[in-house]
Image: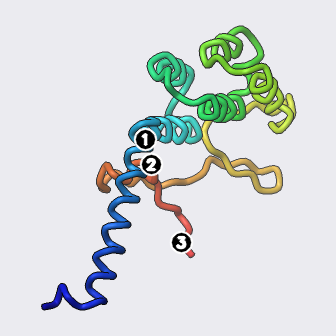
Amino acid sequence: MVQALPEYSKQIDRLSLHVEIAGKINNVIRELGLRELGQLEQDLVFGDAGTKDLNNFLRTKEDVTPENKLRLLMIYASIFPEKFEGDKGEKLIQLARLSPDDVSAVHNIRYLILPEGKKASGGFSLKFDGYKKNAARKDRSDEEETWQLSRFYPIIVV
């Protein structure tokens, strides 16, 4: 009798639509390997990953889209610009098999970085009026692994 109500059938239709959309999103995440990609991006930004991790990812995940490879290398180049001054950067670019335009974009990222006198130490940092301080973060080690990509609580809560 409850199932015959029009409100109930609308809710069932909406719920089934949401389940279908969530399933499609999960399939895309799985197919594109976005969980591993997001983990590596976050590890690079926060200084928990380096050249070896990036090399291993690019070697083992050959089906990564060129856009994702470009984003990874731009993140890496912005955090470790000194790594692109020698052969290491060229080897990474060859491993990623980027187009000439993408290679140019990776090389040009250095123009958005600190002046030559100030070297980036890796990891995420905050700057206020010339004062540089490593960003404070609180690990979410007690959380479920499902939320691994949002693993830090902000120190200041609004």
Whether residue 1 can be seen here: yes
Tell me the kind of residue under disc 3: Val
- Name, please, the residue furthest toward the top: 87
Q: Quadrant of residue 47?
A: top right
Q: Is residue 43 above or below residue 60?
A: below
Q: Nearer the viewer, mark 2 or mark 3?
A: 2
Whether residues under marks 2 and 3 lie with C-beta atoms below 8 angstroms apart, the answer is no
For the N terminus, the image quarter is bottom left
User: Residue 143: image x %, image y %?
Assistant: 31, 56
User: Residue 124: image x %, image y %?
Assistant: 62, 44
> Going by the image, does 136 lie left or right of 106?
left
**Mark 1 or mark 3, earlier in chain:** 1
> Going by the image, does 68 lie left or right of 98?
left
Whether residue 121 can be seen here: no
Tell me the kind of residue under disc 1: Arg
Residue ID at (60%, 39%)? 123
> Going by the image, does 106 lie left or right of 72?
right
Return the mark for residue 5. Answer: none
Judging by the rendered image, the residue that carries numbered circle 3 is 157
Q: Is residue 52 above or below residue 26?
A: above
Numbered circles on residues, count:
3
Q: CA distance from mark 2 to mark 1?
A: 8 Å
Which of the two residues, 6 or 147, is positioned nearer the viewer here?
A: 6
Judging by the rendered image, the residue that carries numbered circle 2 is 149
Return the mark for residue 35. Answer: 1
**Mark 2 or mark 3, earlier in chain:** 2
- The secondary element bearing badge 2 is classed as helix
Which of the two residues, 9 or 121, is positioned nearer the viewer here?
A: 9
Q: Nearer the viewer, mark 1 or mark 3?
A: 1
Whether residues under marks 2 and 1 lie with C-beta atoms below 8 angstroms apart, the answer is yes
